[in-house]
Amino acid sequence: MLKEETIGIAVLDEAGAGGIPNRDEILHAQALRKVFSSGRQQIVPLDSVHFSVARGEMVAIIGPSGAGKSTFLHLLAGLDTPTSGEVYFAGDSLGSLKEAELADYRNHSVGFVWQRHHLLPDFTAAENVAMPLLVAGEAQGRALQTAKEWLAKVGLETHAEQMAGELSGGEQQRVAIARALVNRPTLLLADEPTGDLDERSAESIFALMQRLHQSHHLTSIVATHNLSLARRTDRILQLEQGKLTPAKEVLAGTAAFVAREASAGAMTPGERV
Ligand SMILES: Nc1ncnc2c1ncn2[C@@H]1O[C@H](COP(=O)(O)OP(=O)(O)OP(=O)(O)O)[C@@H](O)[C@H]1O
Ligand SMILES: [Mg+2]
């Protein structure tokens, strides 16, 4: 296991992609590489990615479809393993954790909002939110009570008994956020949480995430296509061709791209990247 100070030095030495150095680092990726083999073809969505997040930061990851945003978040969440390289949480290498410790990391340190919300449609909103507590062994009555408190926090107190499958897209995403946070994780990892929503719902879901980020002292990493929402985070990184690029170049490049496309009539400057 690497000590945090050791990682700090490594980060300073490599201060590349993520902007980085911060003594209050909570999450760190070191030379992360992921290779998928598909037939004879190899896909390398992550190639020597270095990344560091300070406690309390909110970071946006942008990048074109297929760039590897979901893959990256899955590795950070311990849901998948890198081909090489390492992810460290609070100084501990995920690769060195025993299976039970890794499960504990996934269930208690990380709250994950999936790109497709993954709710159980035939269970109520409250039952969906209670699920991580039940998995953790909490009694049903108490788990449902806590779930209802969380539904109130995301503005859905009147929908607790409704089947998840009957809720609107925005409401389902609120349930997914409540479910991600019900175990009081340190990290909130959200994979395009507003991807399927109209502009107004996307705005209100993002505002909700920002509010919870603040009030629950979270460290949040959000993959998004929506640049105007990404701009409201502390830091924007672009993932493209296996590399994480610092925000400044991304924004300059994107602004130029949007302007070019808009003047060519191909798209309005609606800020999708
Ligand atoms: N299990 C897998 N097996 C093979 N290839 C995969 C697998 N998972 C992802 N890939 C490939 O890795 C690349 C990155 O996929 P990923 O889903 O991480 O992209 P993304 O940036 O999240 O895209 P989107 O914005 O569309 O969600 C893609 O080319 C994808 O086809
Ligand atoms: Mg994705």
Image (tube, helix red, strand yellow):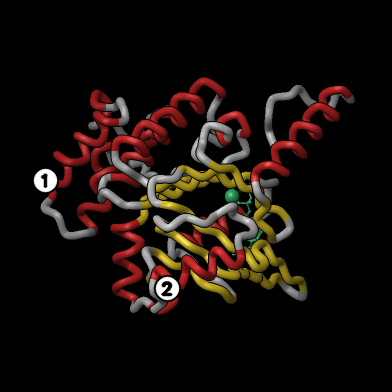
154 sits to left or right of 197: left
Q: Which residue is mark 2?
A: 93
Image spot of residue 187 (x, y percent): 38, 51
Q: Which residue is mark 1?
A: 142
- Confirm if mark 2 falls within 8 A of ligand 1: no
Residue at (35% x, 61% y) in the render: 106
**How far is the residue under mark 2 from the one under mark 1?**
34 Å
Image spot of residue 162 (x, y percent): 28, 30
Closest to the observer: 96 or 126? 96
Whether residue 44 is visible here, answered yes or no, is yes
At label 1, the amino acid type is Arg
Residue at (54% x, 55% y) in the render: 20
At label 2, the amino acid type is Ser
Residue at (32% x, 39% y) in the render: 178
Residue at (65% x, 44% y) in the render: 247
Closest to the observer: 62 or 127? 62
Disc 2 element: strand
In this rendering, the answer to whether 175 lies above or below 7 is: above
